[in-house]
Image: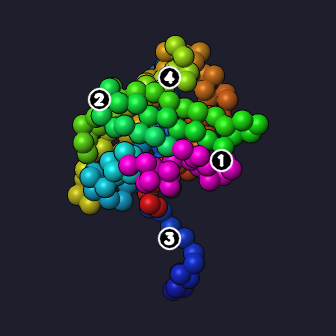
Amino acid sequence: MEARKESEPTPMKNRTTVERKSERELVVTRTLNGPARIVFEAWTRPELFKRWWVPKSFGLSLLSCDMDVRAGGTYRLVFNASPEPMAFFGRYNEVMPHARLVWTNDEGGEDGAVTTVTFEERGAETLGVLGDLYHSKEALDAAIASGSTGGFRETFEQLDEL
């Protein structure tokens, strides 16, 4: 039996699934190593969110992360995109601590998705489910074609590592 070196990453036992559930909905699911309270904090505390949200392979980082996590509160994420920074922003519609977050993606205009994330505690783990509901089939098709939905697996792996 070979011993794993300290510098080697621990193999992840959890799998992230990304599935188109309907013409307008994309759903990401992963069992995360940690209780719902801790996983929820990773989604709602900017200093934690910044550590896992952007897939490392994208070569981007968050320049700023402003989050007023309450129903009616807003968020604004600014990335170091080229040639100019890129902002994503919206409003929290629902905030149920340790259980559910719902927010708008207003940078997409009327085609912006509404995102719902649920946290279901299962012993020492949490089932995390993210659903993006788009305004139309064409809007989801465009998001998939642009590659903007392609980083979910890596993002959720980074969350699990955190």
Mark 2 or mark 4, which has the lower sequence index?
2
Give the left or right position of residue 133, taking residue 108 as reference.
left
Amino acid tagged 2: Ala
> What numbered label is drawn on residue 106?
4
Measuring from the top left, give residue 79's x and y in whole percent. 61, 41
Q: Which residues are magenta?
A: 45-64
Whole-number angstrom distance, CA of label 3 to CA of label 4: 37 Å
Measuring from the top left, give residue 55's x and y in whole percent. 59, 49
Q: Residues within 10 Å of mark 2 (few under 14, many from 20)?
A: some
Q: CB under 8 Å between callouts 3 and 4?
A: no
Residue that mark 2 sits on: 71
Residue that mark 1 sits on: 60
In the structure shown, which secondary structural element does the residue marked by tag 4 occupy?
helix
Q: Residue at x 32, y 26 (%)?
A: 72
Q: CB under 8 Å between callouts 2 and 4?
A: no
Mark 3 or mark 2, which has the lower sequence index?
3
Measuring from the top left, give residue 116's x and y in whole percent. 37, 31
Q: Residue at x 46, y 40 (%)?
A: 66
**Relative vertical location of residue 123 with respect to residue 89 in this rendering, above or below:** below
Residue that mark 3 sits on: 10
Amino acid tagged 3: Thr
Does residue 15 appear in this view?
A: no
Whole-number angstrom distance, CA of label 1 to CA of label 4: 21 Å
Q: Residues within 10 Å of mark 3 (few under 14, many from 20)?
A: few
Mark 3 or mark 4, which has the lower sequence index?
3
